[in-house]
Amino acid sequence: MEKNKSVLRFLYNNCVSQKGLALIATLIFVLVLTTLGIVILTMTRNDIKLASLQEESTKAFFLADAGIERALNWLENQQPPPSAEDLPPDKLDGSHPFTELGTGEYRVEIEIHKIGEIEAGYNITSTGYIPNSENKKTVKKLKALVSLMNFAQYAYFSDIETFPNNSAIPLSSSYAGDAIWFTGNDTFGGRVHSNSQLHIVDVPDFYGKVTSTTETIDFYNKNYRPDGSDFPTDGRGFMGEYQLGVDRIDLPLYRNISDLDDKDSLQRITGGSWKKNDFPSSSGIYIPSITIGTVKNATGGIYIKGNVNSINLDVDSNSNSRISITPQSGSATEIISVTEPFNIPSGSTLNGKKVAGQQLIPANTTLTKEPGKNVYTSYEGLPNGVLYVDGAINGLKGSNHKGKMTVVSTQSITISDSIYYNGRDKKKALFDDDIEGIDDSLGLIAVKDVKIASSAPNNIEIDAIIMALNTSFFYEGWNSNLKGNLGLLGGLIQKQRGPVGQHSAGKKTKGYSKEYYFDIRMASPASGYLPPYFPTTGKYEKIWWKEDLSIDN
């Protein structure tokens, strides 16, 4: 009996012990589930918060980007480009927020970007803000350097890609309206743009971006698809980007060049301190200036009223820029921009007075001089870089053009001989010279044509950015004289493409062979090399763009 009781007691105690273990296991399981639930809830909450922060950060980023685009839009609507005094404009000064889509705001600041003393674009800072539930802000700040695109940045630009009907071009009426082709002999080192359809035979070399307003390209014998998608891009052809169907880019209107009512025309810019009624009506060569005390201060460029027989760009014996001008009526004049000080000899006449002993001419002085005579007039300061001729230039040449200058004619410009930059090593072939080592630049703008005279030498080089607004750049003897090579260091912008020679089956029969070399210094609008006041396209491009991580809330 006792034995049976012991067995029952053992079984009872063991059963009670098993129930305790089950209870403990249940409690542990519940604790684990609770902890896991808390962890999952915490992770979920953190993920939701992180996703919300990422969303706010993305919204702030795009708001800041919208501010950059708004600033670009504002700049493009300003004519002319705003000066430092015009910046910042109302509601773009960083103190006036813009609410966008009900999500936040952005603030924009615009400042002039300078390289030394040269204004080379605008710095834009845009900050996007997104408020959050903790009464704080998510902030993104973007910075960009933008610059107004200049026609000098094009290796080739045209409005119309057909032969012009221009009475100044021999036989133009016989060829008017015919397509002019890019051939396998053509090389373009920079941007190419046309406001009409491109005509291509064989495979030219396009190293820069090619754009056209039309949706198709006219390929000779239909060798490639009209959209250019199978045109070569490796080693030849479109080696840079190409884009069809882009917006039209208008050439400058006449008022941008010559308009006394427009203070920002090249005519008024050349006039400097002159008011509208101060511009001369009589033929002559003028240095716009104001007199302070007894000192004349140059305030503009070089202004010439009337046609000019010849302009020669070179340097004097002191390595100063010298421009020799022979007007069609009146006396010839030399204009010297003194950057290297020198002494004029005893007995010279300076500002109407005889000089006793040598007279030092300091730097930052403009001198006018009668050729062959030591008769000088001095102006404090240098011309602003524009030589404006209210008339035709019938002969332009330059063995050593020094400095940066834009030559403007309200008629046509005739190039009679080579034009070399002073920094150009003439002993080297055009393609072998170190272009980036040259400090000089030259823009040629004609309201009508820029042409090479029939009497020009067998081989000719032109170091300049050429712009012919109505109608073309051409050689007068394109269909009659057999010449050598035409070298161009710069770019070519023209209303309608003009002829410089004739070719048949790849062989030259008349005129010049072309060696066009884009001046790569002009590719960057912030380079500081562009010819002064050279016309712009009205469009801005981003030179660089970055996120500023040093956020100031």
Image: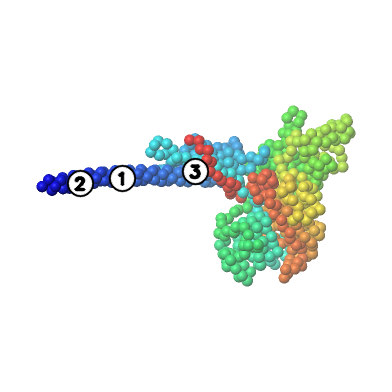
Write the residue at 71% across / 44% down: 386
Does residue 552 lie above or below 12 as drawn?
Answer: above
Q: Quick check: 70 left or right of 332? A: left
Which of label 3 and label 1 is nearer to you? Answer: 1
Q: Position of residue 498 (x, y in %)?
A: 70, 60
Tell me residue 544's x, y (percent): 58, 46
Residue drawn at point x = 64 percent, y = 45 percent: 526
Give amino acid for label 2. Asn
Instruction: State how the image is colored.
Output: rainbow
- Outermost residue, left direction? 1
Camera-side mark, 3 or 2: 2
| Mark drawn on residue 108 | none
> Mark 2 or mark 3, which is nearer the start of the sequence?
2
How far from the left and from the top, in percent, is residue 83?
60, 39
322 and 237: which is toward the camera: 237
Tell me the kind of residue under disc 1. Val
Q: CA distance from mark 3 to mark 2?
A: 74 Å
Where is residue 510, by image quadrant? bottom right
Residue 327 visible to an observer of this rendering = no
Q: Are marks 2 and 1 in contact (CB under 8 Å)?
A: no
Task: Name which residue type carries label 3.
Answer: Ala
Query: For the residues marked 2 and 1, what is the alpha-carbon distance in whole angstroms?
Result: 27 Å
Q: Which residue is mark 3?
A: 64
- Is tag 2's residue or tag 1's residue first in the polypeptide sequence? 2
